[in-house]
Image (cartoon, rainbow, N blue to C red):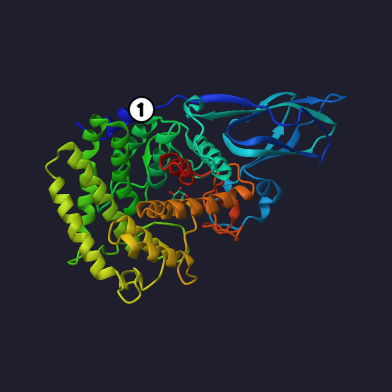
C-alpha cells in the first residue's frame, strides 16, 4: 500500500550522506578583556558548527565569562545592531548567541549556523582571557568531487557559475533546504530549481528522490493540493501552507526527474499523486477554463509587493499540463490524451480571456488589470503565445516602468527560461549576467533570496536582516550556463 508510511520509508532509504570539512578562520588567537571584539573571516560561505578554545591569560578566572557570538552571511549582518531589527519574521532567525562560560576548555557550540563571518564580543570578564583554535566544521551532502568546471569562455559567467554551485552546495544538507540560515525547510518551488541545477552539477539523484517522497507523504488541503513545505526534524511535519503553483511544480519536478534519471519505479509510485494535483486544479477552473481565486495564500509566484498572481498561476498550470502530458506519452500512459486535449483547450481559452489585443499584453480582469512581468512570462512558458509576438511583449514589458518587475532570483529564473524558450539566447545570457552578476559585484559569496538592483534594503519581510543570503532558488545560473552552453 502506497501510504504515508511507505513514502516516508522510501524517503529514509534515500537519506544522503553528509560530508564534513574543517575551515580555519583567519585569526589564530585573541587576547581579550571586557568590551573587546574580533571578527573572524572564513573566506567563504559555510554551513555548520563552530568551536574554539578558551583559556585564562595570566591569572586564574574566578568568575564566569560572558560573550556574544554573532554569525553573519555578510558584513552588513555583522555590523548591524540586532536590537534595531524591524519585526517581520521571527527575530530568533538572527544568528546570535550569548554564552556564559564557567571554566576554561574547548567550547563546541551546539547549533548549526550559516555564515562567512563570526564576531565574538567579550561582554564581561574579570581577567584577561585568550581565545584560540577557532574552527568551523562545514557540512554538505554535495559531493564536490562530482563537480566539473563549467565550460564557458566568459569570465563573469564563470564566476557566476562558481557562486551558483556554492549556493546549491550549501543548501544541500540531509534534504534540499531553501536556505541554511532561514527557513531551513524543504519548499517545492525551491526544490524544483535545486533539482534542475543538481542534475548538471553534483548530480545527486538520491536526494531529489528523497525530497519527492517527503512531499508525497504530506497531508493535502481541502482542495487536494500537496503542502508547499516539509519539516523532517525532530519528526516529520508537513506544512500548513498549500500554494497551488507549488503543488503544480511538484509534478514538474517529477517530470524533470524522470527526464534525467529514467527512474520508472519512482515515477510509478508518484504518478497518482501527480494526476490528482492536476485534477484538483481542473476543479477550480470556471466555465471558460480560467482559474478561480481561492482563499488563503493560494498563488505565490514571487515576493513582489502587491503582485496579482492569478494569470501567472494559470500559466504555471499550462506549463505543468504540457510537461505532464509529455511524461505520460513517454510512459505510454493512456491518460496522456486527456491531459493533452485539456492543454489545448485551456491554452486557447487563456488567450481569448486573458490577453488584451489592444495592449498586446496579458492585462486582464483576473488580476485587476495589473501589468506585471510575471503574467507575461508564465503565459509564454505556458505556450499561450510564442514567436515574434512573445519576444516583443517580453522585451517591452521588461523595459516598461509601468510593469511590476520580479524581486526574487526565483522569478528571474523563469524570465530567463522564457527567453530561452523563445530562442533568445543572447538576450538571456545578457539578462542573466546583469542580474546575477549584479549580486557578485556587491560582494555575494552565494546568491540571495531577494535582490532588486539599486535597492539594497529590499526585503519581503520588512527588514533585510531576515533575508537569506544563500538561497536555493537562486542557484540556477549553473543550470542555464551548463545546459545551454552560455
Ligand atoms: C520563503 C522562502 C522559500 C519560498 C517561500 C515561498 O519562505 O523564501 O524559499 O519557497 O517563501
Q: Residue at x 67, y 35 (%)?
A: 43
Q: Quadrant of the N terminus?
A: top left
Q: Which residue is mark 1?
A: 12
- The residue closer to the viewer here, 283 or 471, is 471
- The residue closer to the viewer here, 52 or 136, is 136
Q: Residue at x 34, y 68 (%)?
A: 362
Q: Residue at x 58, y 29 (%)?
A: 138
Q: Secondary structure at mark 1?
A: helix
- Can residue 310 be seen from the camera position used here? no
Residue 155, position in %: x, y? 58, 42
Residue 72, position in %: x, y? 64, 43
Q: Which residue is most to the right?
A: 58
- Can residue 63 be seen from the camera position used here? yes
Residue 246, position in %: x, y? 35, 50
Instruction: Classify residue 104 by image quadrant.
Output: top right
Q: Is residue 451 above or below residue 204?
A: below
Amino acid at each position: 500500500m502506497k501510504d504515508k508510511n511507505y513514502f516516508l520509508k522510501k524517503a529514509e532509504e534515500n537519506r544522503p550522506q553528509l560530508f564534513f570539512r574543517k575551515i580555519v578562520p583567519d585569526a589564530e588567537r585573541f587576547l581579550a578583556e571586557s568590551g573587546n571584539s574580533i571578527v573572524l573571516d572564513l573566506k567563504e560561505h559555510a554551513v555548520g558548527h563552530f568551536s574554539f578554545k578558551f583559556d585564562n591569560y595570566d591569572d586564574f578566572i574566578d568568575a564566569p565569562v560572558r560573550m556574544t557570538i554573532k554569525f553573519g552571511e555578510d558584513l552588513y549582518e555583522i555590523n548591524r545592531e540586532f536590537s534595531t531589527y524591524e519585526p517581520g519574521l521571527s527575530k530568533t532567525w538572527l544568528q546570535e548567541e550569548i554564552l556564559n562560560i564557567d571554566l576554561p576548555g574547548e567550547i563546541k557550540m551546539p547549533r548549526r549556523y550559516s555564515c562567512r563571518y563570526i564576531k565574538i564580543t567579550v561582554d564581561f570578564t574579570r581577567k584577561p582571557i585568550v581565545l584560540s583554535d577557532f574552527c568551523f566544521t562545514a557540512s554538505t551532502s554535495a559531493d564536490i568531487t562530482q563537480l566539473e568546471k563549467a565550460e564557458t569562455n566568459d569570465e563573469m559567467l564563470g564566476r557566476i557559475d562558481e557562486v551558483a554551485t556554492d549556493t546549491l552546495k550549501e543548501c544541500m544538507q540531509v534534504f534540499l533546504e531553501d536556505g541554511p540560515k532561514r527557513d531551513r525547510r524543504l519548499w517545492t518551488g525551491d526544490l524544483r530549481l535545486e533539482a534542475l541545477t543538481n542534475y548538471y552539477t553534483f548530480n545527486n539523484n538520491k536526494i531529489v528522490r528523497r525530497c519527492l517522497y517527503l512531499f508525497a507523504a504530506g497531508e493535502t488541503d481541502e482542495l487536494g493540493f500537496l503542502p508547499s513545505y516539509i519539516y523532517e526534524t525532530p519528526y516529520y511535519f508537513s506544512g500548513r501552507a498549500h500554494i497551488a503553483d507549488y503543488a503544480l511544480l511538484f509534478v514538474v519536478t517529477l517530470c524533470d526527474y524522470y527526464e534525467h534519471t529514467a527512474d520508472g519505479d519512482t515515477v510509478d509510485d508518484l504518478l497518482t499523486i501527480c494526476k490528482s494535483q492536476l485534477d484538483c486544479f481542473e476543479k477550480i477552473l470556471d466555465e471558460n477554463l480560467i482559474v478561480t481565486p481561492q482563499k488563503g495564500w493560494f498563488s505565490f509566484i514571487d515576493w513582489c509587493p502587491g503582485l496579482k498572481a492569478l494569470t501567472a498561476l494559470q500559466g504555471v498550470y499550462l506549463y505543468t499540463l504540457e510537461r505532464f502530458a509529455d511524461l505520460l506519452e513517454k510512459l505510454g500512459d493512456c491518460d496522456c490524451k486527456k491531459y493533452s486535449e485539456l492543454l489545448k483547450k485551456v491554452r486557447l481559452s487563456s488567450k481569448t480571456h486573458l490577453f488584451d489585443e489592444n495592449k498586446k499584453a496579458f492585462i486582464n480582469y483576473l488580476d485587476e488589470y495589473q501589468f506585471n512581468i510575471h503574467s507575461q512570462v508564465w503565459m509564454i512558458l505556458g505556450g499561450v503565445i510564442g514567436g515574434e509576438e512573445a519576444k516583443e511583449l517580453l522585451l517591452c514589458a521588461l523595459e516598461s516602468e509601468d510593469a511590476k518587475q520580479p524581486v526574487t532570483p526565483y522569478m528571474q529564473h523563469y524570465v530567463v527560461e522564457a527567453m530561452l524558450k523563445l530562442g533568445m539566447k543572447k538576450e538571456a545570457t545578457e539578462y542573466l549576467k546583469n542580474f546575477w552578476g549584479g549580486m557578485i559585484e556587491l560582494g555575494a559569496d552565494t546568491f540571495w533570496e531577494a535582490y532588486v538592483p539599486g535597492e539594497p534594503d529590499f526585503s519581503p519581510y520588512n527588514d533585510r536582516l531576515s533575508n537569506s543570503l544563500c538561497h536555493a532558488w537562486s542557484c540556477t545560473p549553473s543550470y542555464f550556463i551548463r545546459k545551454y552552453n552560455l
